[in-house]
Image (cartoon, rainbow, N blue to C red):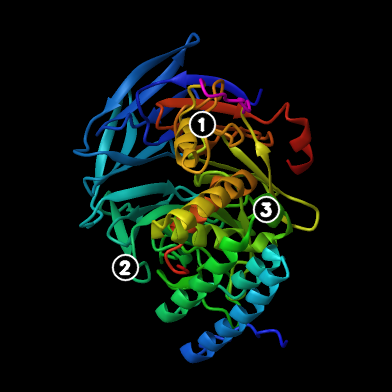
Amino acid sequence: MAEAEKPVEPGSAENILTKIENKSGKIENLIKQFKPAEALQTALEDSPPQDERCKSANWTVVHKALMAVKDVEGMLLSLDPKYYDILMKYVYRGLSTGDPATCDRCLKIHEKLTEKVGFGCILRSLADTVNTV
Amino acid sequence: MAAVAVHQFAQCITCHAWSPDQSMVAFCPNNNEVHIYKLVQDKWEKVHALQKHDQLVSGIDWSEKSNRIVSVSHDRNSYVWNQEGPEWVPTLVILRLNRAALCVQWSPKENKFAVGSGAKTVCICYYEGDNNWWVSKVIRKKHNSSVTSVAWHPNNILLATTSTDGKCRVFSTFIKGVDARESKTGTSSDPKFGEQIVQLDLSSSWAFGVNWSPSGSTLAYVGHNSMIYFVDDVGPSPLAQNVAFRYLPLRDVLFVSEKLVIGVGFDCNPMVFAADKSGLWSFIRFLGERKESSSGPKSGSQFSEAFGKFYGQSRQGLSNDTVEPSKIQGAAHDNCINCIELLKQKGIKTKRFSTSGMDGKVVIWDLENQQDLMEYL
């Protein structure tokens, strides 16, 4: 399957939504193949988009991947470090949903991620008001 | 131990500055006064209290050669203090601000000083001998929010500023009559006063302390997002390095040498950043003691208790003892460090600096015995 290209700013919202749909398909496949860590990394690529609808669509995709992750430590080990800050932002978005299963999973990830990357990561996810998820 | 002296002066210190011979220190104890303490036979004694401001004194600088103190305050005023005999005599400098003054620094030649304000402006003040007063010229454009910190380039003309709009800017503060005109070269013209040389938009959050390297070739500033930015070739096409670190954000930054930077902030412990041979900057270590306390459920550390509650939802019991608490017993400072000053000594390569913080302490640090940092000094 062709790799989604990095969206060139300004990419139209439709364009980005299509790419997210493509991502979604890829991620479902990876989850079925028991590769949740890869699924999450794919979900985090090209995040976060600028448009509100795209943000929601992207969140749905990331959420799917997050819920599929069982081995949090393993996932963090294989995740490319450049995605740590974005992952932390999505963890906070997950915690804000209030849904018990999501929050449970997000708390687990928050704990391990903070252990790995420190408070700086939390600060970066809070202080960045431009690239919100 | 890098911290050679710890002095508790007040409950909380806003900012501090040293006298030229470092026998006296001036600071604001979080009120509207400037206190000057002198070291008399191994004891610090309060020798002066400069009382002219009506509100918090947010910035103090003490010029090395001319022995003048400049203080700025939230009351939108600035005073230049001259020592006449045993007294310090204030001269009001009218800044024409309608918001608080936040920071101040004497220029390298001490003929000007810069004031950053909450009015989104920077005031450059210079002395007019004819009228025997200080005149202020204001840079009104460009800033979108409060100017938190100012730093002079060694050439006495370029000024770097950081602001809560997240950007770091470099301006020219060339003033006719005050600054000597550069030798006339064919095409280059003297930069106009207030002209923005470069705007660095690297941080998406508030930017705080900024500092130039001793030669003026590198600029460093910090963001509230736990990042520090190093910029070379400050000009039309700057080379920037964004260094993210895992600790709490920094508030102020200082170049000890071309390759060594000390950052201070909410971790209450100075952080050492250094550039390797290829010019790549990275975090080396903390300067002060930092015991990794293994906290069990009964430990008093605030952070592990808080994290315990936070994670207790997802699993049973125990407080999390793997996250390092930031407040460690034995560290020199107990609270946020918000000011760092170089302790200059004529002829000797500087290795000493002082920090002051919200715990009311002024701590003097010496890098003399830090073997692993010698290569960077």
Q: Which residue is drawn at 65% across and 52% down?
A: A72
Label 3: how many Cα within 10 Å (few below 14, some 14–19, many 20+) = few
Label 1: how many Cα within 10 Å (few below 14, some 14–19, many 20+) = few
**What stretch of residues is rendered in magenta?**
B290-298
Q: Residue at x 29, y 50 (%)?
A: B101
Residue B293 is inside the magenta segment: yes
Q: Can residue B225 be seen in this view?
A: no
Q: What residue type is labelled 2?
A: Arg
Badge 1 element: loop
Labels 1 and 3 positioned on one and the same chain = no
Does the magenta stretch mainly form a helix, a strand or a loop? loop
Quadrant location of the N terminus of chain A? bottom right
Q: Marks 3 and 1: in contact by CB < 8 Å? A: no
Q: Which residue corresponds to mark 1?
A: B317
Residue mark closest to the camera, 1 vs 2: 1
Q: Residue furthest top?
A: B41
Labels 2 and 3 positioned on one and the same chain = no
Q: Which residue corresponds to mark 2?
A: B140
Q: Residue at x 73, y 26 (%)?
A: B369
Residue B146 is inside the magenta segment: no
Q: Which residue is drawn at 33% across and 42% down?
A: B58
The image position of residue A42, as x and y in percent, is 65, 72
The circle drawn on residue A91 is none
Q: Which residue corresponds to mark 3?
A: A71
Q: Distance between the residues labelled 1 and 2?
A: 56 Å
Badge 2 element: loop
The image position of residue B226, as x and y in percent, is 53, 51
Q: What residue type is labelled 3?
A: Asp
Q: How far apart are marks 2 and 3 (CA)?
A: 55 Å
Q: What residue type is labelled 1?
A: Gly
